[in-house]
C-alpha cells in the first residue's frame, strides 16, 4: 500500500499515421521520371554545339579554294570537315552522287581528288528501326501503362478477396521460439489442468479408446498480465503442435459478415493442420453476452459469435483441434460460450504468490548479469500484487537503470528503485519546492509511517520518501511480510487510521487552518475503504449484510449504477456509519501522534536531511513494532 500527496497532471500522446501508398502514387512517379529524363536529354541536345548548314554552291566554292579536308556522305546528308577542323552540314538529292554534283558545279578533278571522301551506308536494321521506332514506342508506352493499371486493379481485387481471411498468426511445431511449461513459472495448478490437453494432442487415440472426450474449448481466466497467452503457447510447445493465434478484435470489421467469414477460414485452416491449437486472445471482444443492452448493439459482433458457436459444435473432437481463449472478464461472456461442449473447461490464472514471484524473477533474471549479493526473495517480498508482466517490467527497468549508471551488473538498489518506478512513476528530483512545502510533506509522510508502525494490525513500513515520484509529492510504502487472501476488521481499522495519519500530522504540526491539499487522495481512499466496510463486508453496527446491487459497465469494467435495496433511512444510517468509522480512525491517529510527538519531530528532522528512509533506518529511529495482543 502506498500513501502520499498527489498533484494532478496531464500527458498528451500524439501519433501520426503515414499515408499508405496507392497505385496513383506509383503512376505519378513513373511519369515524373519520364519527364525528368526527357528534360535532361533535351538540355543536353540544346547545349551541344550544332554544325553550320551550307548550300551546295558554298561547298563547291570551299572545295575549289582547298578549304575542305574531308566529306562524309550518308544518304542525302553531307558532313563536311574543313581544314580548320570546323564542321558543316549540307544536303543533296539522294539519287545523285557527290562527285558528279561537284563536277556539275565546276569543281576540278584534282580538287576532288584531294578530299578524303567517305560514303556511309545505312544497315537494314537501322533502316528498319528508323521506320518502326516512331510507331512502336508510343504503342509500347501505352501497353505498359495499361498493364500497370490492370495489375493495380487486380491487386485491389485480390485484397478484396482476402478480406474474409482470418489473418491468424501460425506458429509451427518446429518454431525456434517454441515455449514449454519450463518457461512459465508458477501456476502449477493451471499446468496440471492443461496437461490433459497436452496428452490428448500427443496421443488422442488413448482417450478415444476408452470413450473419453477431451474438452473442445479451454477458457483461460485471470487478471491482466498473469500469463494467459504465454500459457497457451506453452501448451502448444509441450504438445509440439501448430498454434494459431488471433485476437478477438481482429474478427470484427465495419462490413457485416466479414467476421463470420474469418471464423470459417480460421477453422478451415486449423482442420488442415490438425492436431493443433486455436487461441483467441481477448475473446470478450466478440463473445460478450448478446442482448445485454450495454457495450453497443453490433450485428457484426453477434454474427461472429454465432459463427464461433457453430464451428465449435461442428468439428469432431477426435481430429485434435483444441480451441483456447483468454479473457480477464469472464463475467461478461455469453452463456452459450460457457455451456458443456464449448468452453466447458475453465482454468484460472491468479496473481502469483511470493514463491511464484521468486520463480518468475529467476526466469527474467536469467538473461541479465546480476551481482552476487542480489536477493530475489527480498524482491519478491516487496512486490505483493504484482503480475508476471509487472515483474518482467521491473527486471527490464532494472537492466535499463544499470546501463544508465554505466554498470556491468544489476544489484539490489537498481531492482528496488525499479519497483517504485513501476508502482509510482519516475523520480522528480528537479521539482522545485520551498522549505515550508518540504517540511509539510515530511510531516505528512512521517505521520503515515508512525501510525502504521504503532498499530500492530497494520502492515510494516518498508520505506518513507519525500522525493516526488509520479503524481505523488512523497510516499510511504508499507507491505505485508507474507501474502494475504483475507483481511480482518482490525486490519481495516488500522489502515483507516494510517491513511488519516498524514492529515492528522499536518494538523498537529501546523494547525487546523493550515492543512494542505496533499491529503486529498488519502481522504478519498479512506472514505472508499469505510464505505466498503459498511456496504460490502458487514463490518459496522448495521450488521452482517450488504447494501446495494452494483452493476458494471461491460466494456469499461467500471461501476455505473447501483440498485438500492434499502430505504432512505438506511442510506442515512450508512452515511452516518461511514462518518463514524472515519472519525474513530482520526481519533486513533491523534492518540498515536500526540503520544509520540517527540518521535514524530525526530523522524521529520531525519527526513529533511536524508529525504528517504528504508525500513532498518526507520525502525532504528522509532523503535521496534508493538506486537499484537
Image: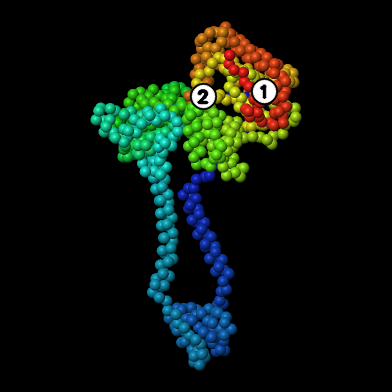
In the depicted structure, whether residue 575 falls above or below residue 426: above
**Residue visible at 51% across and 24% down in the picture:** 483
Quarter placement of the N terminus: top right
**Residue visible at 55% across and 8% down in the picture:** 542
* Nearest the eye: 309 or 78: 309
Give the residue number, with chain letter if any, for mark 1. 622
**Residue closest to the far top:** 569
Q: Describe residue 569's horizontal placement relative to residue 193 as left or right.
A: right
For disc 1, the neighbor class at 10 Å (few under 14, some 14 to 19, many from 20) is some
Q: Please name which of the two marks, 2 or 1, marks the residue nearer to the observer.
A: 1
Identify the secondary structure beneath mark 2.
loop
In the depicted structure, whether residue 357 falls above or below residue 457: below
Task: Locate residue 543, reporting x and y percent.
Answer: 53, 8
**Residue visible at 53% across and 44% down in the picture:** 18
Give the residue number, with chain letter if any, for mark 2. 483
* Nearest the eye: 567 or 624: 624
Question: Quick one: label 2 or label 1, which is nearer the N terminus?
Answer: 2
Amino acid at each position: 500500500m502506498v500513501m502520499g500527496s498527489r498533484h494532478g497532471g496531464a500527458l498528451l500522446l500524439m501519433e501520426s499515421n503515414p499515408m499508405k501508398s496507392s497505385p496513383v502514387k506509383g503512376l505519378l512517379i513513373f511519369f515524373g521520371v519520364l519527364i525528368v529524363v526527357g528534360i535532361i536529354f533535351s538540355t543536353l541536345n540544346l547545349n551541344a554545339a550544332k554544325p553550320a548548314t551550307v548550300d551546295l554552291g558554298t561547298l563547291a566554292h570551299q572545295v575549289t579554294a582547298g578549304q575542305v579536308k574531308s566529306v562524309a556522305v550518308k544518304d542525302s546528308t553531307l558532313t563536311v570537315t574543313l581544314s580548320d577542323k570546323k564542321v558543316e552540314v549540307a544536303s543533296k538529292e539522294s539519287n545523285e552522287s557527290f562527285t558528279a554534283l561537284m563536277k556539275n558545279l565546276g569543281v576540278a578533278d584534282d580538287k576532288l581528288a584531294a578530299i578524303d571522301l567517305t560514303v556511309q551506308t545505312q544497315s537494314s536494321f537501322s533502316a528498319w528501326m528508323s521506320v518502326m521506332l516512331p510507331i512502336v514506342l508510343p504503342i509500347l508506352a501505352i501497353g505498359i501503362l495499361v498493364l500497370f493499371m490492370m495489375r493495380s486493379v487486380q491487386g485491389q481485387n485480390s485484397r478484396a478477396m482476402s478480406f474474409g481471411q482470418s489473418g491468424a498468426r501460425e506458429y509451427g511445431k518446429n518454431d525456434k521460439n517454441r515455449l514449454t511449461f519450463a518457461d512459465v513459472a508458477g501456476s502449477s495448478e493451471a499446468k496440471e489442468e492443461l496437461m490433459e490437453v497436452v496428452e490428448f494432442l500427443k496421443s488422442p487415440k488413448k482417450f478415444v479408446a476408452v470413450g473419453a472426450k477431451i474438452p473442445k474449448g479451454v477458457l483461460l481466466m485471470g487478471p491482466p498480465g498473469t500469463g494467459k497467452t504465454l500459457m497457451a503457447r506453452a501448451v502448444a510447445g509441450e504438445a509440439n503442435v501448430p498454434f494459431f493465434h488471433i485476437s478477438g478484435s481482429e474478427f470484427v470489421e465495419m462490413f457485416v459478415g466479414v467476421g463470420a467469414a474469418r471464423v470459417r477460414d480460421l477453422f478451415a485452416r486449423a482442420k488442415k493442420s490438425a492436431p493443433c491449437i486455436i487461441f483467441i486472445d481477448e475473446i470478450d471482444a466478440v463473445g460478450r453476452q448478446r442482448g445485454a443492452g450495454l457495450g453497443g448493439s453490433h450485428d457484426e459482433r453477434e454474427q461472429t459469435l454465432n459463427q464461433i458457436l457453430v464451428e465449435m459444435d461442428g468439428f469432431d473432437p477426435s481430429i485434435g483441434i483444441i480451441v483456447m481463449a483468454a479473457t480477464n472478464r469472464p463475467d461478461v461472456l455469453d452463456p452459450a460460450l460457457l455451456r458443456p461442449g464449448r468452453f466447458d473447461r475453465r482454468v484460472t490464472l491468479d496473481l502469483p504468490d511470493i514463491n511464484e514471484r521468486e520463480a518468475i524473477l529467476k526466469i527474467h533474471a536469467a538473461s541479465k548479469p546480476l551481482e552476487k549479493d542480489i536477493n530475489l526473495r527480498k524482491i519478491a517480498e516487496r512486490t505483493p500484487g504484482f503480475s508476471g508482466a509487472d515483474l518482467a517490467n521491473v527486471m527490464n527497468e532494472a537492466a535499463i537503470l544499470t546501463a544508465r549508471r554505466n554498470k556491468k551488473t544489476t544489484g539490489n538498489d537498481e531492482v528496488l528503485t525499479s519497483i517504485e518506478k513501476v508502482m509510482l512513476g519516475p523520480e522528480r528530483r528537479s521539482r522545485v519546492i520551498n522549505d515550508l512545502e518540504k517540511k509539510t510533506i515530511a510531516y505528512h509522510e512521517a505521520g503515515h509511517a508512525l501510525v502504521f508502525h504503532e498499530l500492530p494490525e497494520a502492515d510494516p513500513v518498508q520505506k518513507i520518501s519525500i522525493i516526488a515520484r509520479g503524481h505523488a509529492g512523497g510516499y510511504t510504502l508499507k507491505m505485508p511480510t507474507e501474502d494475504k487472501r483475507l483481511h480482518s476488521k482490525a486490519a481495516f481499522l488500522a489502515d483507516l487510521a494510517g491513511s488519516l495519519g498524514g492529515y492528522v500530522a499536518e494538523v498537529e504540526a501546523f494547525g487546523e487552518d493550515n492543512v494542505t491539499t496533499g491529503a486529498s487522495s488519502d481522504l478519498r481512499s479512506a472514505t472508499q475503504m469505510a464505505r466498503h466496510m459498511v456496504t460490502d463486508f458487514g463490518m459496522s453496527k448495521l450488521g452482517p449484510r450488504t447494501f446495494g446491487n452494483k452493476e458494471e459497465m461491460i466494456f469499461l469494467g467500471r461501476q455505473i449504477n447501483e440498485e438500492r435495496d434499502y430505504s432512505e433511512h438506511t442510506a442515512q444510517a450508512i452515511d452516518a456509519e461511514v462518518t463514524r468509522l472515519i472519525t474513530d480512525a482520526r481519533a486513533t491517529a491523534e492518540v498515536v501522534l500526540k503520544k509520540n510527538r517527540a518521535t514524530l519531530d525526530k523522524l521529520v528532522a531525519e527526513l529533511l536531511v536524508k529525504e528517504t528512509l528504508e525500513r532498518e533506518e526507520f525502525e532504528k529511529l522509532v523503535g521496534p513494532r508493538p506486537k499484537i495482543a
